[in-house]
Amino acid sequence: MVMAGRSITSLSNLEPGAFGEVVLLQARGLARRRLLDLGLVPGTRVEVLRRSPGGDPTAFWVRGTTIALRREEGRQVLVKPV
């Protein structure tokens, strides 16, 4: 996906070791509130740390802490790779 000349992807598409900047949350309701509470607000830089052996969940470094998101949650977070 391309938004305003920038390549945009979901957080779930980034590989371990990659970085992204949060652009948009597509989640609604309580799911959106949870993502915001975890620090995933537009402009936040996120690093993909590791995936579990089964591939789900994935650990991310966000604002000085490690969080884990399931693949479906990560799909709701659009990022610009950096």
Image (tube, helix red, strand yellow):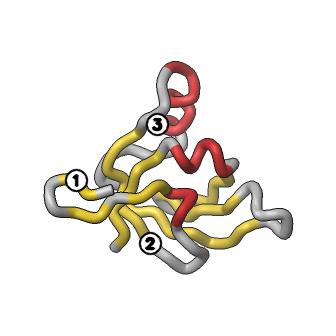
2 and 1 marks in contact (CB < 8 Å): no
> Residue beneath label 3, please?
36
For residue 26, the mark is none
Residue shown at the point (33%, 59%) measured from the top left: 8
How far apart, in angstroms, are the residues tagged by discs 1 and 3?
21 Å
Q: Amino acid at mark 3?
A: Leu
Marked residue nearer the N-terminal end (2 or 3): 2
| Secondary structure under the numbered disc 1 in the rendered image | strand
Residue shown at the point (55%, 64%) measured from the top left: 61
Residue shown at the point (26%, 58%) measured from the top left: 2
* Quadrant assignment, res 17: bottom right
Q: Is residue 80 above or below residue 16?
A: above
Task: Work out which residue is located at the far front of the displayed protein and give it.
Answer: 1
Viewer-nearest of discs 1 and 3: 1
- Foreground residue, 45 or 70? 70
| Secondary structure under the numbered disc 3 in the rendered image | helix
The spot of residue 76 in percent (x, y) is 50, 42
Q: Is residue 49 above or below residue 65?
A: below
The spot of residue 55 in percent (x, y) is 77, 63
Task: Work out which residue is located at the far right of the displayed protein and give it.
Answer: 53
> Residue beneath label 2, please?
19
Viewer-nearest of discs 2 and 3: 2
Q: Amino acid at mark 2?
A: Phe
> Residue beneath label 1, please?
3
How far apart, in angstroms, are the residues tagged by discs 2 and 3?
18 Å
Task: Work out which residue is located at the far left of the displayed protein and give it.
Answer: 4
Q: Is residue 44 left or right of residue 68?
A: left
Residue shown at the point (22%, 53%) measured from the top left: 3
Marked residue nearer the N-terminal end (1 or 3): 1
Q: Is residue 82 above or below residue 39?
A: below
| Secondary structure under the numbered disc 2 in the rendered image | strand
Q: Amino acid at mark 1?
A: Met
